[in-house]
């Protein structure tokens, strides 16, 4: 049953604690299964990939083809209906512009001691992106993962996607072509993550793996982290909406359901200072669920994980919003910036009454790969820097070493590391 309370009611604090701490990730413990799959791929390479693909995706890679040929993805882009291609190209353009603006600057300067120090940014050589597949189409996920990698300067972008019965949606291939993906492989699941991390006879290992997936994919990324970099371990989608009574309840209901339709474990929460408006939104949600094509999923999500919380003033909601640290936060008020200034934890924030979260999923520009499960407290959405690494550098001449070397010797000796101290002291002795 949907959670419904007012902030002043008895037991609210305990009930909200339970809401915050509720575990919505998949109940099944898949870690052992994933560990076994990773071990098979690491030890047996392509033979394991072929066997696991036959088992889980019901096709023979030798017959359907391991890799999607460039001509096939190019044809998919050329074959798009005109208005859909225009929409895809607009999304790609906006995502590219936004992420190119994220490129970090190198630093190179001389400090007061005469030491030249700084840092240089470089892209990783190979990035792997995981895209959910089958008859569902997620071209936006392709753009949101591949374009930042391209903007970072990654030379080789390797896409893996499951192909149930050998099928990949042409819209996904079109997006890959538009985004500049280098290779596309008909492989999915934990086995695809393992192949990207360790490499096989056919697939060369990558440096970073990003992209969404089910519980097996998320667990596989967790287990290979350290062998490769990953973007994040993502859980069920979530949205928090802070809205006053001036909003159209039909709009806010649709915003809440936009996340509820993702998965039965998704979460949608409304904070409002208007009890009547809360009732209207609840009624509109019920009305929309009656006609929504994804009603079964959305209904389960809303009934099991949804919440409507009434506060006396919208400012009272902000500490609660920070505790939730949601993936998406909408501030549907006249002056959203006044509230936004007080928000500390959120994956992405949507300001005003005409900025539904859905525009961020597709065409706004910022990345839609965002931290979930309260991870916005300590992590950020996908960016170009997830495909880059920073290398610091130091250059001392004789004067610079004379200025800072004695302190290094003192600290090395204090830590009981005489060879460290000697490597500096020997140079200091030969200074003029």
Image (cartoon, helix red, strand yellow):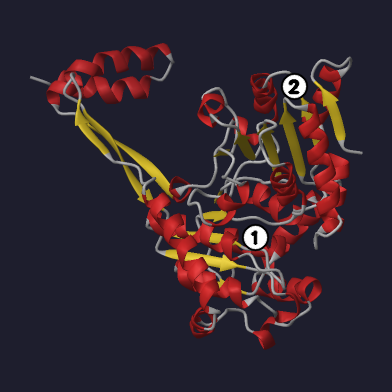
**Label 2 crowd bin: few (<14), some (14–19), many (20+), radius 10 Å:** some
Answer with the quarter of the image where residue 167 lies. bottom right
Comparing 189 with 328, the one in front is 328
Disc number for residue 194: 1
Task: Estimate the x, y position of residue 211 in percent, counting from the top left.
Answer: 60, 56
Task: Estimate the x, y position of residue 18 in percent, counting from the top left.
Answer: 84, 27
Disc number for residue 96: none
Left or right relative to 359: residue 108:
left
Comparing 136 with 54, the one in front is 136
Disc number for residue 311: 2
**Residue 26 seen by the camera:** no
140 versus 222 height, above or below: below
Residue lying furthest left: 432
Task: Estimate the x, y position of residue 319 in percent, counting from the top left.
Answer: 66, 21
- How many numbered discs, if any? 2
Left or right relative to 280: residue 45:
left
Residue at point 83%, 60% (across, down):
291
**Label 1 crowd bin: few (<14), some (14–19), many (20+), radius 10 Å:** many
309 versus 412 height, above or below: below
In the picture, which quadrant includes the N terminus? top right
Q: Distance between the residues labelled 2 and 1?
A: 47 Å
Comparing 93 with 221, the one in front is 93
**Residue 46 seen by the camera:** yes
Residue at point 35%, 49% (across, down):
122
- Disc 2 to disc 1: CB gap under 8 Å: no
- Circle 1 SS class: helix
- Circle 2 SS class: loop
411 versus 337 height, above or below: above
Left or right relative to 162: residue 103:
left
């Amino acid at each position: 049953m949907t959670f419904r309370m007012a902030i002043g009611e008895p037991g609210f604090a305990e009930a909200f604690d339970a809401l915050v701490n509720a575990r919505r990730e998949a109940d099944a413990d898949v870690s052992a299964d994933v560990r076994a799959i990773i071990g098979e791929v690491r030890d047996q390479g392509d033979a394991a990939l072929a066997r696991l693909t036959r088992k889980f995706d019901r096709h023979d890679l030798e017959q359907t083809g391991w890799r999607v040929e460039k001509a096939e993805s190019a044809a998919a882009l050329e074959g798009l209906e005109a208005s859909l291609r225009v929409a895809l190209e607009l999304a790609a353009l906006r995502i590219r512009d936004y992420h190119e603006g994220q490129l970090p600057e190198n630093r190179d300067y001389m400090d007061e001691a005469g030491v030249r120090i700084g840092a240089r940014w470089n892209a990783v050589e190979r990035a792997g992106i995981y895209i959910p597949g089958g008859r569902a189409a997620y071209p936006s996920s392709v753009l949101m993962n591949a374009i930042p990698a391209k903007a970072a300067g990654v030379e080789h972008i390797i896409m893996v996607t499951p192909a149930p019965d050998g099928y990949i949606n042409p819209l996904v291939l079109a997006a890959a072509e538009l985004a500049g993906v280098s290779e596309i492989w008909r492989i999915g699941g934990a086995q695809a993550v393992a192949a990207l991390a360790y490499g096989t006879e056919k697939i060369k290992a990558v440096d970073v793996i990003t992209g969404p997936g089910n519980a097996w994919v998320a667990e596989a990324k967790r287990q290979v982290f350290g062998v490769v970099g990953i973007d994040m371990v993502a859980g069920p989608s979530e949205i928090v909406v802070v809205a006053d009574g001036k909003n159209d309840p039909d709009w806010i209901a649709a915003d809440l359901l936009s996340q509820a339709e993702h998965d039965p474990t998704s979460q949608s929460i409304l904070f409002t200072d208007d009890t009547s408006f809360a009732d209207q939104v609840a009624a509109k949600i019920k009305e929309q669920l009656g006609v929504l094509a994804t009603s079964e999923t959305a209904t389960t999500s809303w009934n099991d994980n949804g919440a409507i919380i009434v506060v006396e003033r919208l400012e009272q909601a902000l500490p609660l919003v920070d505790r939730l640290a949601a993936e998406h936060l909408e501030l549907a008020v006249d002056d959203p910036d006044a509230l936004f200034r007080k928000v500390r934890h959120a994956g992405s924030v949507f300001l005003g009454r005409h900025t539904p979260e859905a525009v961020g999923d597709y065409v706004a520009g910022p990345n839609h790969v965002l931290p979930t499960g309260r991870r916005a407290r300590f992590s950020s959405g996908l960016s170009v820097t997830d495909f880059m690494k920073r290398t610091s550098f130091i250059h001392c001449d004789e004067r610079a070493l004379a200025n800072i070397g004695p302190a290094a010797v003192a600290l090395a000796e204090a830590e009981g590391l005489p060879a460290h101290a000697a490597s500096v002291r020997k140079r200091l002795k030969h200074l003029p």
